[in-house]
Amino acid sequence: MKQKFNLWIFLVLCLGPLNANTLRLNVGFWPGNLEPELENRFFLDNLIEGSSIGSLNLPWANKNTNTIYPLGFQYFLPVGKNQIVIGANFIYMAPEYRYTSIAIPPTAVNLVQLKEFAINDLEGELGYQITTGKIIITPKLGFRYHRQNFTNSELIIGQVFGFTVGKNDFSAVANGNYLGLDFQYKIDNQLSFIVEYLNTMLLPGFSGSMEYKTTTFITSGALLLTNQSSSYDVKISRWKLGLQYDIDKTKFFQFGIRTEEQIHSYPGYFNIPIVIIGNNANIGLDIVSEIISDNFIWQKEEKQEKGLIYFAFGIDLNL
């Protein structure tokens, strides 16, 4: 019921009425690192294998991602002296994460790539813009569809040799609502100071599900299988500070700083790793400790953050 309700809200926000007075097209550039919530989670998951020590993950590389955001539109509908604002945006982030994991004791090295890592967010917003002198305030309600996915690729080199085979896909999807506020102060006819803040703090946050399957072949003849699943919860907080320069009455340029912090967790995480050797399948003697430790590691909240400088351009079309 919740997903259907959110989808209905999103369609209303995106489609909007057809008699909009002004259509604004927005495009921006948001460079910087995406600090992944999975880095610390994978570190603990690999380090703690049941009641024993597994492997040590080194820091992840290639965290930079040049994001095109905002990429979308806004409808402005006059209501007296103020306006209803209906908008939508698409967000895409694709860092090329990779890291090295060293077995303890150091008998093998595991080279890991998160191939085709991508975050796809689609958001819609409904706001009410209030103008008082030089101040413009827009409280808003938003909806976001969030997806995080990648393909796991591993190469094990050492006393044993191994590699991933078949599909090794991670997919986590969630959606939900947030509250936000835009603030603009006109310094003069062309220059404005702008602030944006949004948060899921007063709302339940985003919820959905996660699936992660891996298959690794070891040259000793073993096949390691995992089939991981859980719920998926996300909380978000974003703010920006910047300046807006109005080139003319229909075009403007913005620049400043923006950061978004997301808190991810995977409640109800469940996985029973299976080792296949020949015709025999084994779940391991330490499976109880493994389930307990994995559940704690994946249910734990971890932060994912993107920042810092951004640039944006907008153009208004009168309809």
Image: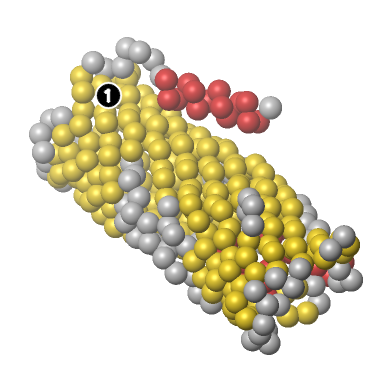
Please say whether residue 148 is visible from this viewpoint.
yes
Q: Quadrant of residue 7?
A: top right
Q: Say if 129 sits above or below 19 in the image.
A: below
For image coordinates 14% across by 39% down, the residue present is: 246
Residue 202: image quadrant is top right
- Residue 242, given in percent of the width and then of the height, sits at 26, 51
The residue lying at 72 percent from left, 50 percent from top is 229
| Residue at far bottom of view | 105
Residue 299's spot in the image, x, y percent? 70, 58
Residue 258: image location, x then y, percent: 34, 54
Q: Image quadrant of residue 315?
A: top left
Foreground of the two, 303 or 51: 51
* Left or right for 88, reference 1: left
> Which residue is located at x 66 percent, y 47 percent?
210
Quadrant of the frame with the N terminus: top right
Q: Is residue 240 left or right of residue 276?
A: left
Q: What SS does tag 1 mark? A: strand
Q: Is residue 213 above or below residue 14?
A: below
| Vertical comparison of 305 with 1: above or below | below
Question: Is residue 242 at least partly visible in the picture?
Answer: no
Q: Which residue in the protein does label 1 denote?
A: 23
> Of the residues shown, which amino acid type is indicated by label 1?
Leu
Front-lying residue, 32 or 77 = 32
Viewer-nearest residue: 53 or 163? 163
Residue extending farthest to the top is 19
- Image quarter hosting the C terminus: top left
| Residue 159 in the figure: left or right of residue 314 | right
Residue at point 32%, 12% (across, down): 19
